[in-house]
Amino acid sequence: MESFWPKIDTNNFDSPFNLIKIQGDLLEQNTNGVLTYFIDKKTINHSHWPTGSALRFEFFLRAPLFEDFKFMLFYLVHDLVAIYPVLIGSFTNEKSIKCNNFEELQRNLKEILNKSETAAVLNSLMMQSK
């Protein structure tokens, strides 16, 4: 039978969600699983976005050996349909940062993950998880 679906791009994996999932997997590898992560996904209604709805991804650090402590490190928000621009915010920034493409998102996420405040949280959770 003929498919009525439009052509779907199955080769582009440069999405905000994939980027943070890969970084989460790398965190788990780098800490030998002492620190893990989870991403809370939700739809929010807001007139700021073209469709009136947006996806919000909240990236939480988890320390399973420290009474399953959770800490929201950063979040991403983008329109329900259009992936870019995406807003990225973190516990270290008062305002979110607008990223117009994947490269800008990578640069800003790297900056957040490399901040001394982020390192302090990671080191504290590692020490308390042993």
Image (cartoon, rainbow, N blue to C red):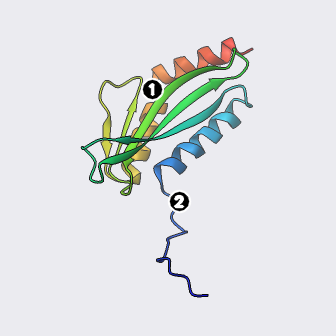
Q: Image quadrant for the N terminus?
A: bottom right
Q: Is residue 11 above or below residue 34?
A: below
Q: Residue furthest front?
A: 1
What amino acid type should be assigned to the residue bearing mark 1?
Lys
Q: Which mark is residue 40?
A: none
Residue where numbered disc 2 is placed: 13
For marks 2 and 1, give the one nearer the viewer. Answer: 2
Q: Residue at x 43, y 32 (%)?
A: 112
Give residue 11's position: percent from left, percent from top. Answer: 54, 68
Residue at 73% from the left image edge and 18% from the top image edge: 65
Type of residue at label 2?
Phe
- Image side of residue 24 versus residue 77, left or right: right
Residue that protrudes farthest toward the top in the picture? 128
For residue 62, above or below residue 81: above
Determine the secondary structure under disc 2. loop
Residue 64 quadrant = top right
- Along the line of sight, which residue is nearer the eye, 54 or 91? 54
Q: Position of residue 85 (x, y in %)?
A: 32, 50
**Image point (66%, 18%), residue name:** 126
Identify the secondary structure beneath mark 1: loop
Task: Characterize the local packing of mark 1: few (<14), some (14-19) or many (20 or more) Cα atoms within 10 angstroms.
Answer: few
Left or right: where 25 falls relative to 103: right
| In the depicted structure, whether residue 58 falls above or below residue 125 | below
- Label 2 and label 1: CA atoms lie apart by 26 Å
Q: How many marks?
A: 2
Q: Earlier in the sequence, mark 2 or mark 1?
A: 2
Residue 115, labelled with which disc?
1
Q: Quadrant of residue 66?
A: top right
Q: Position of residue 73 (x, y in %)?
A: 49, 27
